[in-house]
């Protein structure tokens, strides 16, 4: 059969060679499970989204993020567990006096807009809510301040005159989850660290594997004691993949894999391009362009803000780093600093989606939570390929062409007989635009645009 050959050449016209590369999707050969794609609206960006946009523009902003017909179809929300000294930024703004004194928790039912944002996401079917603390409250730390790093009192090498606050911090985190659960927003993941390898002027807490390993069993047991073993623990949201890799080695040696469900990392100091050795799922939990001014470009010169650049990062993470989730930093921002650290910009009236949003959409709209990545064989010039099997049995094949010529592909399947095919492309002139994919004899043919993407969904 021709489709079994790696390359089928047919020479047309005046010497133009239209190569059609053959790819086989091995649908029964499953790799990592996909939990989804998402954003955060932490640090008040959720409240701004709610308060500075209303009516149709607000709806459009939500649709851009979560709608599977008109937007990216994101499925994960990452919320910040505040640690500040005001009731709007913390459920325990003041010290109860000591680690064993009764804590007077209170919740403002708003959480800087994150309650509203989470509820909006739920309307689109989002079920994955990652609650992530940047720091313990200041009074629980060696530096008595939620900002500027410092360690959790009671972790190895960090004793404080006020005592050991590990159990109190676990109680604080569990109480935050209860406030959300009681209001019908079930928290699914809990992280107790954010960038523990970076001392920030805002909420931040330092930790290596040894500090983390002295807290993980405490929080694990406290979740269980409170009937919350359905909340999965993550660690450690380090600044970059390489740091998270070395922290993970320490966690694995300390036997922490039995308590954790996810290894989580950001990509600021190194991208996820290779596997971290663990049996846990791995998530890239915060990614952003923190350098450029706002740009909505799909492709210009490979700059950090461009959609193609992010498509490559997501592809690398899924194909080479065994990622189960990829989360950008912010979703929608209104009249914020002129940056590209978010996916959709608004001036309060109109909304502008970025190429970065459409990069996410090419996977997230079609590859739904619970899907498994499956293996492929065959290759296409300059083109990355990832394929997935959804829980409803549909199969999705995503092509990312970094070359300057269109690639024609012929996709066959093992252990799957497609009955229908839909295809969508994104490039400099199109954003998830429907195109023709021809299905014949169980094989689908379509074209991947130059410097662009093609996603084929088969049912
Ligand atoms: C507990 O916190 C609430 C809300 O911040 C406050 O009104 C109340 O006075 C506090 N109670 C005690 C005993 O500190
Ligand atoms: C998504 O957008 C479509 C098309 O505008 C609309 O019909 C649908 O209601 C939206 N979905 C949700 C959950 O709002
Ligand atoms: C986990 O269990 C708690 C307590 O029964 C419940 O309130 C919460 O909704 C559950 N969460 C999930 C994600 O199922
Ligand atoms: C990929 O991650 C899964 C957990 O999601 C793990 O079981 C598997 O061993 C990992 N694969 C590799 C190659 O590390």
Image (tube, rainbow, N blue to C red):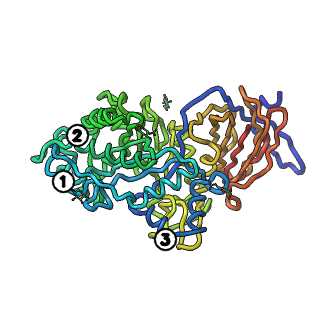
Query: Residue at (77%, 35%) from the top-left corner?
Result: 7
Describe residue 54's horizontal placement relative to residue 450 as left or right. left
Residues at circles 2 and 3 in contact by the CB criterion of under 8 Å: no
Screen quadrant of the C terminus = top right
Q: State the residue position of label 2.
A: 167
Tell me the residue at 28%/38% (across/down): 212
Q: CA distance from mark 3 to mark 1?
A: 34 Å
Quick check: can you spot residue 381? yes
Q: Nearer the viewer, residue 435 or 46?
A: 46
Q: Earlier in the sequence, mark 3 or mark 1?
A: 3
Q: Quadrant of residue 456?
A: top right
First in sequence: mark 1 vs mark 2: 1
Quadrant in the picture for residue 173? top left
Q: Earlier in the sequence, mark 2 or mark 3?
A: 3
Q: Residues within 10 Å of mark 1 (few under 14, many from 20)?
A: some
Q: In the rendered structure, are the residues bearing label 3 and label 1 in contact, judged by CB atoms less than 8 Å apart? A: no
Where is residue 275? Give x, y as percent: 47, 35
Mark 2 surroundings within 10 Å by alpha-carbon count, few (fewer than 14), some (14 through 19), many (20 or more): some
Task: Return the x and y of residue 346 as percentages of the image width and height.
Answer: 54, 69
Per the image, label 1 sits on a secondary structure element best described as loop
Q: Is residue 382 in view? A: no
Could you give the CA–CA distance between mark 2 and mark 3, rounded to whole angstroms? 39 Å
Residue bearing mark 1: 95
Q: Is residue 197 positioned above or below 117 on the image? A: above
> Where's the N terminus, which quadrant?
top right
In this view, the residue farthest toward the right is: 13
Q: Looking at the picture, how far across and down is residue 410, in whole percent?
A: 77, 38
Residue pointed to by mark 3 = 52
Question: Is the distance from the Cβ of mark 3 to the nearest ligand 2 atom less than 8 Å?
Answer: no
Residue depicted at 29% across the width and 60% down the height? 87
Q: Secondary structure at mark 2?
A: helix
């Amino acid at each position: 059969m021709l489709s079994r050959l790696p390359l089928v050449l047919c020479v047309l016209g005046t010497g133009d060679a239209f190569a059609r590369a053959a790819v086989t999707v091995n649908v029964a050969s499953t790799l990592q499970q996909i939990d989804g794609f998402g954003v955060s609206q932490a640090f008040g960006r959720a409240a701004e989204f709610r308060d500075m946009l209303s009516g149709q523009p607000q709806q459009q902003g939500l649709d851009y993020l979560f709608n599977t017909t008109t937007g990216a179809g994101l499925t994960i929300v990452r919320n910040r567990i505040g640690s500040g000294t005001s009731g709007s930024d913390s459920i325990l703004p003041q010290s109860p006096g000591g680690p064993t004194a009764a804590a007077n928790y209170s919740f403002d039912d708003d959480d800087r807009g994150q309650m509203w944002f989470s509820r909006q996401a739920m309307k689109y079917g989002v079920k994955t809510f990652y609650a992530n603390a940047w720091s313990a409250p200041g009074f629980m730390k060696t530096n008595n301040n939620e900002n500027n790093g410092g360690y959790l009192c009671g972790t190895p090498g960090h004793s404080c005159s006020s005592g050991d606050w590990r159990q109190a911090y676990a109680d604080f985190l569990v109480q935050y989850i209860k406030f959300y659960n009681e209001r019908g927003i079930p928290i699914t993941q809990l992280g107790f660290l954010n960038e523990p390898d970076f001392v920030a002027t805002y909420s931040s807490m330092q930790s290596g594997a040894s500090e983390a390993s002295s807290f993980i069993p405490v929080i694990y047991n406290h979740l269980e004691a409170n009937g919350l073993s359905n909340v999965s623990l993550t660690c450690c949201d380090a600044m970059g993949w390489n740091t998270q890799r070395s922290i993970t080695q320490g966690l694995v040696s300390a036997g922490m894999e039995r308590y954790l469900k996810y290894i989580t990392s950001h990509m600021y100091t190194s991208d996820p391009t290779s596997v971290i050795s663990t049996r846990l799922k791995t998530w890239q939990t915060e990614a952003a362009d923190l350098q450029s001014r706002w740009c909505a470009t799909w492709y210009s010169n490979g700059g950090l803000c461009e959609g193609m650049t992010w498509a490559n990062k997501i592809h690398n993470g899924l194909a080479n780093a065994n990622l189960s989730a990829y989360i950008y930093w912010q979703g929608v921002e209104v009249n914020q600093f002129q940056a590209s650290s978010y996916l959709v910009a608004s001036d309060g009236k109109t909304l502008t989606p970025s190429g970065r949003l459409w990069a996410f959409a090419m996977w997230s709209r079609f590859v739904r939570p619970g899907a498994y990545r499956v293996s492929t064989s065959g290759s296409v010039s300059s083109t990355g390929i990832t394929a997935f099997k959804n829980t409803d049995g549909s199969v999705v094949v995503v092509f990312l062409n970094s070359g300057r010529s269109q690639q024609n592909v012929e996709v066959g399947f093992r252990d799957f007989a497609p009955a229908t095919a839909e295809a969508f492309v994104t490039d400099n002139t199109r954003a998830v635009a429907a195109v023709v994919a021809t299905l014949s004899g169980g094989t689908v043919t379509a074209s991947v645009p130059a410097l662009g993407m093609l996603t084929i969904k088969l049912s």
